[in-house]
Amino acid sequence: MKKLTTPSFFGIITLGLLVSFSFMFPLSDSRIEPGDSDYDDFETPEYCAQCHNQFYQQWKQAMMSEAYTHHWDEIEYFKLAVAHAEADPDFKEAVDGCNGCHTPMAYLVGDFPPPRPSEGSRANESVSCEVCHLIKGISGDTAYNFNFILEPGDTKYSSRKGETESPNHEIVEIDLHSDTRLCGTCHNEKSPFGVWVKSTQLEWEEGPYAENDVTCQECHMPDTEMRTAKLGSTYPDARMHLFNGGHDPGKVKGTIELRIQPDIRETVPGEVVVLTATLFNQKTGHKFPTGSVEDRIVWLHVEAEDEDGNTFHIPVDKKGFEGEEYTIASDVLAYQDMGVPLGIENFEGVRREDVPIGDRIYRMPYFDPEGRMTIMQWNTASLGVDYRIGPRETKTETFTFELPFEIKPGKVQVTATLYYRLLVKPVGEFLEVPEEEYTALEVNSHSTEITVYP
Ligand code: HEC
Ligand code: HEC
Ligand code: HEC
Ligand code: HEC
Ligand code: HEC
């Protein structure tokens, strides 16, 4: 049995435990088990490339082909997750389970932990062609925690059985590959505490794109006229294997439309101008940010600049909702639970985010069993306020700007800029993750003008 609570939790346990225990073994209703297969049961992506070269080249440039080898994945898996399971064996099952989504072949082989990426093992194939095209179903109704049914062999599953036969494999047409639940098997994740720590497909289901039947595939595997195989037929709607998302600046830019306007255009120092910013999510089929929400932040920075080039930072006005403190940048410390896998006693943590104090942050905090913010999603016992921007949702923010007496009379330009980071910077720096993982990306910006009279 797993240890779930610390003694301090004793009061609330009975019901909590009953609820949680039913989720404690999320793998038990999964149809794949470690040891079911051998690496030789699978073809390599290079083998498929002989006839499906375009898809192979696209996939190779996508995160799917790096899900096991990418630097931050390697760091988090080995430095934090594997080390955490060594310090606390209750986490071993969840940590072995990382591979169920990041390198399903290695999971099926039962290779835990798989060799480091530098050793060049077949675990490096990550989410390969075979992984998705050997999936023939899912177990249960809700897709999560790699509950796909995968059968190695010559039969490949997809949404189309074309006019041409393949000389090298059988094709069976199933609906699952044009269904979002295929994606949901890996893009929805429940922690060992029964908390949804990834819910991209569930967010989609609740949103307007599900109603209009605009699937994940529409936006992440757009269709165009092309041959799907060498010697195959040309189809008007062949699915590109792009899978570009958070790691593609072009995909992220412009996700949110941004405008800002003042309530008065002419004023004098000492007076107050209230600026209103409007943020419209015109591009994602799920919330923004989504996926690894424990890592990702989006924030809005507003500043005024006078004709002499002096700048004045304008903090966001509080709205007063519960948990709002997590959505306004501060200098508090967080992520103390990293101390356990890192073997640092009484670890004081690192800054929660490195963003100008007072800026609005669009995020959802994850909490460890002691109620401290965590980026270790497997150690997440509860979630905080969800202040992300939903699909086609519009949020507004106000900024009360008391014009300082030192401002230069004349035109004053106020600029709102929305930034995105894949990983909170202090954690990236602390764990020595390459900088590209926490470089601030400008999602959008807009400026407005006021005139200040002496
Ligand atoms: C077998 C598991 C699995 C399945 C099935 C799966 N994904 Fe993924 N996907 C992953 C993993 C793991 C990553 C993260 C790669 C990384 O950064 O480590 C990922 C990353 C992505 C990304 C993000 C790339 C980025 O730039 O950050 C997109 C977009 C994506 N998947 C879309 C899809 C879509 C659409 C489907 C369904 C057609 C799908 N995925 C099915 C495992 C899966
Ligand atoms: C209407 C278009 C649209 C639909 C539908 C859509 N997405 Fe996205 N998705 C985007 C855009 C735009 C981004 C880039 C902005 C961002 O990171 O959220 C994105 C980003 C992502 C990311 C990267 C998130 C990150 O932080 O790295 C993943 C993973 C992803 N989508 C998976 C999915 C899955 C799974 C589905 C279906 C359940 C889906 N998307 C449906 C447009 C869409
Ligand atoms: C020797 C050539 C060859 C190899 C190798 C090959 N395929 Fe195919 N494959 C084809 C042909 C030809 C078709 C039929 C294309 C058509 O419909 O016009 C096809 C069709 C498919 C389809 C169905 C979609 C469609 O367009 O009909 C899938 C899915 C697929 N292949 C996956 C794979 C995977 C995964 C691998 C690697 C394990 C692979 N193939 C290896 C030749 C090949
Ligand atoms: C993350 C899962 C995933 C991975 C990885 C993946 N595919 Fe696919 N593939 C799909 C889905 C989903 C579809 C069908 C999309 C639809 O019809 O909406 C598809 C369609 C195809 C098709 C048929 C295209 C069509 O329009 O009929 C071929 C051929 C194919 N894949 C080959 C490959 C090859 C080769 C690789 C590796 C280089 C690969 N796939 C990797 C999910 C994946
Ligand atoms: C249910 C499937 C699933 C499980 C289990 C899972 N992951 Fe992931 N992981 C994903 C998907 C899908 C993404 C991509 C989400 C996104 O793009 O935001 C991802 C993203 C990540 C990222 C961020 C990649 C980046 O470049 O920003 C890291 C690091 C990571 N996972 C590590 C782990 C570790 C460590 C474990 C085990 C404790 C684990 N994952 C368990 C599916 C899973």
Image: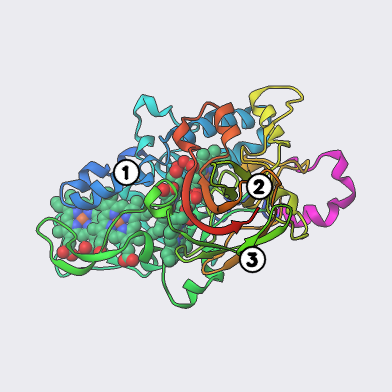
State the residue position of label 1: 41
Q: What span is colored magenta in the figure? A: 2-21
Viewer-nearest residue: 69 or 393 = 393
**Residue matched to label 2:** 192
Secondary structure at badge 2 equals: loop
Give the structural element (helix, strand or loop) at label 3.
loop
Task: Locate residue 445, reporting x and y percent.
Answer: 49, 54
Q: Mark 1 Cα within 10 Å, few/some/many (few <14, many 20+)? A: some
**Residue under pointer 3:** 264
Q: Which of marks 1 and 2 is in front?
A: 2
Q: Which amino acid does label 1 sit on?
A: Asp
Q: Is residue 152 left or right of residue 147?
A: left
On the image, the x and y values in percent for residue 175 come to: 37, 70
Which circle's residue, 1 or 2, is located before the other in the chain?
A: 1
Sequence-earlier tag: 2 or 3? 2
Q: Of residues 66 and 294, which is closer to you in this image?
A: 294
Q: Nearer the viewer, mark 3 or mark 1?
A: 3
What amino acid does circle 3 point to? Ile
| Amino acid type assigned to the residue bearing label 2 in the image | Pro
Quarter of the rendering containing residue 165:
bottom left
Label 3 beta carbon within 8 A of ligand 2: no
Q: Is residue 238 above or below residue 378?
A: below
Mark 2 neighbour density, 10 Å: few (under 14) some (14–19) many (20 or more): many
- Let me know if residue 386 appears in the view: yes
Q: SS of the residue at dot 1?
A: helix
